[in-house]
Image (cartoon, grey):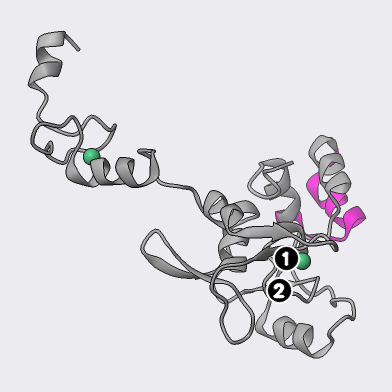
Amino acid sequence: MKMSEKLKAKSCLVIDCSKPLKRGDRYCSMHRARLTRTGRLDKKSAPEVLAARSTFTENGCIEYNGFRNALGYGRLRFAGEKHLAHRLAFAALVAPIPEGLFVCHYCDNPACINPSHLFLGTHQDNIDDMKNKGRGIKGTMVHTSKLTPEQVLLIRVDPRHYPLIAREYGVTGTSVRSIKERRSWQWL
Ligand SMILES: [Zn+2]
Ligand SMILES: [Zn+2]
């Protein structure tokens, strides 16, 4: 872009923003307000928002310290929508949550958003989970959270066919695929 063109620019300088400039500014009023308020032009990601409001506990949980509902689950607004904190954490850090499935806690701590303490379950799993506090979860589900980080790394480099790997680790072929394609456990 030539200098003369840049000077003539009529829209906000933020990439992909085509809002008109605020008078005498290089940004639109929305971006100028965000910059003034937060010191940055991009929105915070879900993990950033969650991390800023959470603390580690001794037993390895990451507890959400913002608003909690009557059942003890963290609740927040993100990107204009209401979310349960542990579901938002799971969706952002592990895998999208298939419709109708619940995000359950291994650690029995509803405020916990530690991705490795969360797993996908059916409605029945969720009920069992609440009933059998402290007892192991019965493995009816597709969750890959029952793997340890070490196992996930081994799966990534395992050259064998997916079904073989899946059988060995007691997960589904779909789980193996999403681990290998980095759609789950992305932080490893
Ligand atoms: Zn803008
Ligand atoms: Zn936990």
Tell me: residue 110, above or below residue 185. below
The amino acid type of the residue labelled 1 equals Leu
Residue at the (56%, 82%) spot, across then down: 69
The amino acid type of the residue labelled 2 equals Cys
Q: Residues within 10 Å of mark 1 (few under 14, many from 20)?
A: many
Q: Nearer the viewer, residue 188 or 181?
A: 188
Task: Specify whether residue 37 is painted magenta.
Answer: no
Residue at the (26%, 46%) spot, across then down: 33
- Residue 118 is marked as 1
Q: Are the two marked residues, 1 and 2, in contact with CB atoms closer than 8 angstroms?
A: yes
**Image quarter for ligand 1:** top left
* Residue position marked by numbered label 2 in the rendering: 104
Q: Nearer the viewer, residue 26 or 182?
A: 26
Q: Is residue 134 left or right of residue 122?
A: right
Residue at the (63%, 85%) spot, across then down: 71
Range covered by the magenta-colored residues: 159-174
Tell me where residue 126 appears, x and y as whole percent.
71, 82
Q: Secondary structure at mark 2?
A: strand
